[in-house]
Image: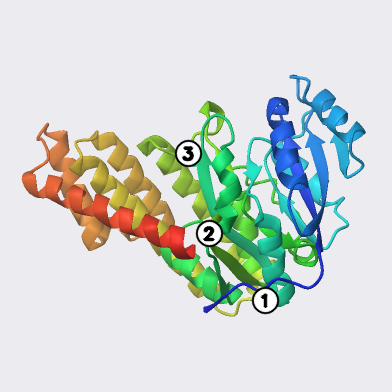
Amino acid sequence: MRVSWPREAKDFATVTAVIPCYNYGKYLPQVVHSVLMQKRVEAKIIIVDDASPDGSVKIANALAEGDPRINVVAHEKNMGHIASYNDGLARVETEFVTLVSADDIVAPGALSRATDLMMTHPRVGLVYGLPSEFRGEPKATWDADGAHRSSWIIWPGKEWLWWACLRGRNFIFSPEVVMRTTAMRQVGAYNKELPHSADLEYWIRAAARWDIGRINGPSQAYYRVHDSNMHVTTYNTLQLDLEHRLAAFLVLATPEVEHRLPNGAHLLELARRGICREALLLAERNLDSGGPAQASLEFLTVATAAHPVAASTLRGRSVRSRIRRAQTGAAPTGFQSFTESYRHQLNRARWVAWRKVGIS
């Protein structure tokens, strides 16, 4: 890992924003504006409407009629979001590319910050940063966000991947990513067999080939939170998230990645242990906060799928003991409540670390 201060590139970069859209037509003007108002880059847009029944394609075409920088691809039938990603990305001709959902917004200055980093460091193929969540309408104060002091972190791809595997996590939301188009072409298409974790698998494949850059400081994208895209917040959805993560990390065992990562088997083992560890931790947290024993039994199943010896580890035995106690109807002990309070503070510290440096 190397930290440095930003440097502006001498030349303006060309960037295409691929915007997949399904029933998000009402948000298209906002995301399109956020791309076209970017400074110090020459921006283009490809909107891919996936046969939206809400009339999104009409809004997209109206935007394109008024600006030659906008192109619209209209699917005659719904093909799914992964197919929309791949369709749009295959049409990119600029030096850099970003994939932005129609309901998200690119932060002011984000594209120039990302392309400055990649133009300064030719081995970096992917840049990410801080995505900030919002509800409702864009905020006028966002214009000042780019004034925040920033720094760069350059990760050798294999080092960044080691941390992702160790933690068994996806450090990147997605709308904040800008890629070198050459890197995108080498990495290839998104995996349609992984509709819920294709992004993580894509970052793994990218890190196997290229270095990873991170913009610290200002927001790089604004992620809209609403009912149809709510983050995982329940134990049930967290369980599914862990299963999808495990499916994504399995790409480490494929021939495509194995020949680029001599330690790929070790990395996959790290990822399995990381997901196992988190599943067991969530099982404990569920019980220590008074949750149902069934939820923890399901987490134990996920942990065992990730690593067969999960139940026999120290934490696994602790989970099984807690489950047996909860099944008798006993409430969490004072020690359990204290432990859960401590974990809450530890998670907050990790969240702060992620905001600062992009890993946690």
Identify residue for label 3.
231
Name the residue carrying label 1.
259
Residue 157, image x, y percentages:
60, 73
| Number of callouts | 3
Q: Nearer the viewer, residue 284 or 34?
A: 34
Where disc 3 sits, the SS reads loop
Answer with mark 2 or mark 3, whichever residue precedes in sequence.
2
Expressed as whole percent of the image width and height from the top left, the position of residue 293 reads 24, 36
Badge 1: residue crowd in 10 Å (few <14, some 14–19, many ≥20):
few
1 vs 3, front mark: 3
- Answer above or below: position of 135 versus 86: above
Q: Is residue 71 left or right of residue 302?
A: right
Are the residues at dot 1 and dot 3 in contact (C-beta closer than 8 Å)? no
Q: Nearer the viewer, mark 1 or mark 2?
A: 2
The spot of residue 195 in percent (x, y) is 63, 42
Position of 124 relative to 341 (above/below): below
**What crowding class fits label 2: few (fewer than 14 Cα within 10 Å), some (14-19), or many (20 or more)?**
few
- Type of the residue with mark 2: His
CA distance for labels 1 and 2: 41 Å
Dot label at residue 148:
2
* Colour scheme: rainbow
Task: Compare marks 1 and 3 and give the one earlier in the sequence.
Answer: 3
